[in-house]
Image (cartoon, rainbow, N blue to C red):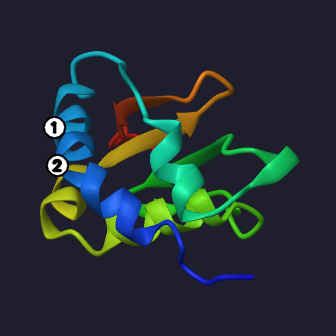
Amino acid sequence: MEERQYLTTWKRYLPVIRLHLKKSLNEEQQFKLNIQDFESAGDRGKSGYIFSLTMENGKLLNSVGGSPVARDLFEVLRSDEAVKAILQDKNVKISVGKTFVLTIKTTYISAYK
């Protein structure tokens, strides 16, 4: 198994993801990914590229160990200073479904937890 095979692909998408993260503060954001970008990085076969990342304050809340695509996206996000700043005091859910559309939903963390 190749390690971190999707890092380069996600790094190319980072500027677009950063922009959509900012916009997601006002409304849910969606954009279509190019499946060929990911297929050229590695074949996920039947397991596909479907995943969901849930973060609070930039910390991962769900397990992504079984999805190299999700794991590598989280790695790229947490290593980017601008993204880390955006993620502070927020709940963010990033998901990719069967139609290869990346969806970003962001909510502010309540001060009254």
Q: Nearer the viewer, residue 91 or 112?
A: 91
Tell me where residue 109 sits by quadrant: top left
Q: Residue at x 50, y 43 (%)?
A: 36
Label 2, label 1: how many angstroms apart (C-alpha)?
6 Å
Q: Which mark is residue 44?
A: none
Is 71 displayed left or right of 108 in the figure? right
Camera sees residue 58: no
Numbered disc 2: secondary structure = helix
Numbered disc 1: secondary structure = helix
Q: Nearer the viewer, residue 2 or 87?
A: 2
Which residue position is annotated with label 1? 19
Check disc 1: other Cα within 10 Å, few if <14, some if 14-19, many if 20+: few
Which residue position is annotated with label 2? 15
Please name which of the two marks, 2 or 1, marks the residue nearer to the observer: 2
Tell me where residue 19 sits by quadrant: top left
* Residue type (three-letter) at the residue carrying disc 2: Pro
Check disc 2: other Cα within 10 Å, few if <14, some if 14-19, many if 20+: few
Q: Quadrant where the N terminus lies?
A: bottom right
Q: Residue at x 23, y 33 (%)?
A: 20
Give how far across and how far down residue 17 sits, in percent.
Answer: 27, 43
Give how far across and how far down residue 95 sits, in percent.
Answer: 55, 37
* Residue type (three-letter) at the residue carrying disc 1: Leu
Camera sees residue 103: yes
Give how far across and how far down residue 50 sits, in percent.
Answer: 68, 40
